[in-house]
Structure formats: C-alpha cells, structure tokens
Image: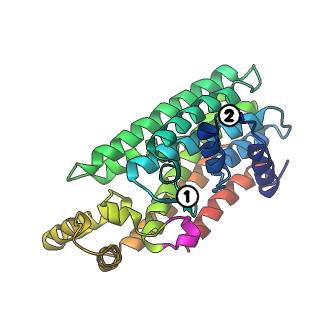
C-alpha cells in the first residue's frame, strides 16, 4: 500500500498531465492556471487513501481522484467571483486575471470535464460513483446558496452555520472518501463509515480555515489574512463572538463587522481584539479538536487491521498540527 507522500506525488503527476485542448486558449488556459496552483489536494488524497485501505491495487482510481480535484477547483473559481476574492494560493484569482465571464465559463467546463474523468472508472462501480458524486455536487451548490443567504441574514445560529459548512465544504471531502471506498470494493456499511469519518474531518477543516483567516499567516493560507472580516462574512468565529458577547459588545461587534468606514488593517485589528476579549480562538480550537476526535472514533468502527486505517488517523493528526 502506497504511503501518503507517494499518493500525493501520483496525484500531482496525473493532474499536471491532464490533456486539455490547445484551443480556445481563453477557455483552457484559466483551467490549467487554476490546477497548477497546487493546494492541499486533500480531496483526491483522501479518495486514494480510502480506496487503498480496501484494495491496494490501483486501476482507474486516479481518474476519480482528478475528477474531485477538478470539481473542487471549479467551486473555487465561482466562489472567488461571489466573494470578490483577489488572491488564491498566493496568485491572482481567475476572475481578476481574465474577468468574470471567462471565470464562469472555464468553471462550467471544469464540471463537465470532471464528469468525463469519472466516466472512466471501473464499470462495476460507475453507477454508484456517479450517484455519490452527483449528490455531493448538488449539496455543495446548496451550501453555497446558504452561505450567500447568510450575507443578508442578521441572526445565523451556530446550528445553521454548521449545516452550511457541512454542505459547502464537508460533503465534498466525505463524498471523495466514499468514492474511494466504493472503488476499493468496500461494503455499503464500510463506505458509510468512511463518509461519516470524512464529514467530521471536513467540519474541522472549515472551522480551522475560519480560525486561520483571522489568526493564521498569508504563507500558510496562500491568501490575505482577514478577508472574512473585511467582507463581514458569517464564520464560526463571528457567530461565536455574537453568542459570547453581552448586548453592548454584541451591537458594537456587529456594527464593526459591517462597517466600511475603517481602513482594512484597522478593521481586522479591532475585530481580532474583540475575538481575543471573548476567547473566540480557544473556542474554535476546541471545536476543531472535537470534530477530529469524533472522526477518530468513527474510524474505530471499521473492522480492519490497525495498520490499514493508520494513514487516515495520521490525516487527522496533520490537521490538528496545522493550527498550532
């Protein structure tokens, strides 16, 4: 069974050699630019990892791994337009470099290309894989709609926010894991276990991104720090702040979060001061750890040798290390 580093090399090599047509360049160059941006490749990695614990022999799994990564990057193209994000992975976003229309069209082509890649998987599993992928894809769109709805909603509960990130972020990670298990010949029950494991992993991952947006570094995130604060976005941190603050501080915080009067650096600093006053960072870290521990507990339901599931446990540990 290949280790994580070997699987990562396989993924990068395969994605770098995806055959996109030479013309029209205006359509395909932004796609290549996006995929060359790297990123964590978490979704294809977890797909190959779950596949390999059930069957270490690889045949068509790299097609599926590339498919989930291409789809993930499509969501980033469209998200960056909706969020008006300028930087992604340390580079100009596609809509900044080529414009909104090109970004939309290239993103659309990426969805179609992802399905084309999926169609090449083992015919024994194709129907189930397409079912998982399609459900996952529509749920991601639902999550994005909720995220946009929250922009004009004054009071968003923690439960509503967690459901939004389950759909927008977590189901793509969980669906990737379930596809991998399916391609490895896992039973339906085993596929459900790895899905639930990865769902918890995805929740932790998104809350961690919320935390790092305020308390991380540009080098770690590959984008400017404080972007969520400047946009007044609903995040785990902002929702916890409204829950923990008294009435006076809550009103001050909400006004500050939606204010355009301050310079960006000043706004970020003042919001972070409130976060520090309310101990929001520690609450976020504890919530991340809660979901990661839940992921580990779920893995114990697999009736497999310890060494087989160890790579998935190490993936949990690597996420825990990322916010320290």
Span of residues in magenta: 216-223
Q: Position of residue 127 (x, y in %)?
A: 65, 20
Sort mark 2 into few (<14), some (14-19) or many (20+) by Cα contacts within 10 Å: few
> Which is more toward the observer, 53 or 64?
64
Q: Nearer the viewer, residue 278 or 297?
A: 278
Position of 78 with respect to 253 (left or right) is right
* Magenta stretch encompasses residue 217: yes
> How many angstroms separate mark 1 from mark 2 (CA)?
44 Å
Which quarter of the figure is the C terminus placed in? bottom right
For the residues labelled 1 and 2, say whether their Cβ atoms are less than 8 Å apart. Answer: no
Residue 117 located left or right of residue 89: right
Q: Position of residue 3 (x, y in %)?
A: 81, 54
Front-most of residues 312 and 73: 73
Pointer 1: what residue?
292
Picture quadrant of residue 242: bottom left
Q: Which residue is mark 2?
A: 23
């Amino acid at each position: 069974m290949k280790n994580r580093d070997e699987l990562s090399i396989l993924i990068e090599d395969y994605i770098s050699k995806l055959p996109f047509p030479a013309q029209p360049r205006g359509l395909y160059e932004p796609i290549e630019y996006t995929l060359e941006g790297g990123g964590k490749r978490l979704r294809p990695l977890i797909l190959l990892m779950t596949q390999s614990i059930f069957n270490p022999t690889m045949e068509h799994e790299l097609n599926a791994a590339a498919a989930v990564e291409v789809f993930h990057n499509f969501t980033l193209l469209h998200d960056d337009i909706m969020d008006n994000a300028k930087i992604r992975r340390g580079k100009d976003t596609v809509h900044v470099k080529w414009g909104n229309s090109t970004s939309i069209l290239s993103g659309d082509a990426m969805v179609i290309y992802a399905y084309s890649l999926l169609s090449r998987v083992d015919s024994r599993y194709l129907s189930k894989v397409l079912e998982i992928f399609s459900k996952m894809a529509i749920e991601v769109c639902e999550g994005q709609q909720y995220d946009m709805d929250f922009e004009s909603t004054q009071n968003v509960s923690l439960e509503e926010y967690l459901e939004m990130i389950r759909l927008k972020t977590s189901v793509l990670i969980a669906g990737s894991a379930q596809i991998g298990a399916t391609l490895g010949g896992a039973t339906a029950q085993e596929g459900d276990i790895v899905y639930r494991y990865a769902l918890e992993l995805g929740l932790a991952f998104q809350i961690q991104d919320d935390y790092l947006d305020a308390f991380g570094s540009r080098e770690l995130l590959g984008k400017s720090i404080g972007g969520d604060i400047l946009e007044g976005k609903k995040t785990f941190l902002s929702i916890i702040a409204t829950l923990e603050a008294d009435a006076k501080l809550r009103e001050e915080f909400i006004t500050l979060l939606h204010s355009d009067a301050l310079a960006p650096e000043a706004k970020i600093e003042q919001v972070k001061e409130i976060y520090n006053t309310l101990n929001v960072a520690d609450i976020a870290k504890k919530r991340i750890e809660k979901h990661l521990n839940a992921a580990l507990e779920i893995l114990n339901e697999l009736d497999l040798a310890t060494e087989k599931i160890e790579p998935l446990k190490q993936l949990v540990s690597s996420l825990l290390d990322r916010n320290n």
